[in-house]
Image (cartoon, rainbow, N blue to C red):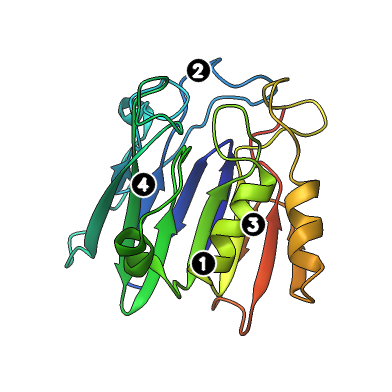
């Protein structure tokens, strides 16, 4: 598996089959401090229609497109806020099954999960979850959800950092501190990860590959 953190909530993941998928590509100029996503993938998933998550038209196909069997994909309908979508609308959690490995992208989740929704992603192999707050859940809520979901590997996303991200959202440090307090090991990577997913509970910190 190859994981590239483009930035914000956008990832490109090359699955074990060789097929590549892109989650939540952002539009030109929509995220301060990030250059154009310039993502390349066989398939695109957008959690909702806001322009910093839904520029599927900008994602280019690989020079040699994948023509094999596509993975099983499941969507969980949730909300972008904690008032039933009244403030910011709906949000989809995307689950991709990569030969038995469950990959979960939480989108701009802003609400809690029902027991039934939690059961669908519990024990997933890879979880990408927003931690910045304001538009999404914050670091404390993200940590609480991780305790329920119990992922093997978790990557925080949708946070601000040195020179990038929205001023109103926080960094990833609060979430990382909570995870580290449990003794979960941490891997810091520049912007891409290649190879088998780490064994055991892991916090994978990835810096945006498109940081200006």
Badge 3 vs badge 2, beta-carbon distance below 8 Å: no
The crowd level at tag 1 (other Cα within 10 Å; few <14, some 14-19, many 20+) is some
Badge 2 vs badge 1, beta-carbon distance below 8 Å: no
Could one spot residue 18 in this view of the protein?
A: no
Read off the residue under disc 2: 28
Question: What secondary structure is marked by label 2?
Answer: loop
- Could you tell me how far apart the alpha carbons at marks 3 and 2 are, in whole angstroms? 31 Å
Nearest to the eye among marks 2 and 1: give it. 1
Could one spot residue 25 in this view of the protein?
A: yes
Q: Position of residue 170 (x, y in %)?
A: 74, 33
Read off the residue under disc 3: 143
The crowd level at tag 3 (other Cα within 10 Å; few <14, some 14-19, many 20+) is many
Q: Position of residue 20 (x, y in %)?
A: 36, 55
Question: What secondary structure is marked by label 1?
Answer: helix
Image disc number at residue 148: 1
Q: Earlier in the sequence, mark 3 or mark 1?
A: 3
């Amino acid at each position: 598996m190859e994981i590239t953190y483009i930035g914000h909530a956008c990832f490109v993941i090359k699955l074990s089959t060789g097929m590549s998928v892109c989650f939540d590509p952002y539009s030109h100029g929509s995220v301060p401090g990030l250059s154009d996503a310039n993502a390349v993938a066989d398939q695109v998933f957008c959690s909702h229609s806001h322009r910093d998550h839904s520029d599927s038209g900008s994602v280019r196909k690989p020079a040699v497109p994948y023509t094999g069997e596509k993975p099983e994909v499941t969507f969980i309908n949730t909300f972008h806020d904690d008032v039933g979508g009244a403030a910011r609308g709906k949000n989809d959690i995307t689950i991709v099954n990569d030969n038995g490995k469950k990959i979960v992208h939480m989108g701009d989740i802003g609400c809690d999960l029902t027991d039934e929704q939690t059961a669908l992603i519990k024990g997933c192999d890879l979880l990408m979850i927003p931690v910045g707050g304001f538009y999404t859940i914050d670091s404390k809520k993200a940590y609480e959800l991780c305790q329920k979901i119990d992922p093997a590997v978790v990557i925080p996303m949708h946070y601000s950092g040195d020179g990038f991200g929205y001023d109103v959202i926080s960094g990833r440090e609060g979430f990382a501190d909570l995870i580290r307090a449990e003794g979960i090991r941490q891997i810091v990577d520049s912007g891409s990860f290649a190879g088998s997913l780490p064994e055991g509970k892991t916090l994978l910190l990835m810096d945006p590959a498109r940081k200006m």
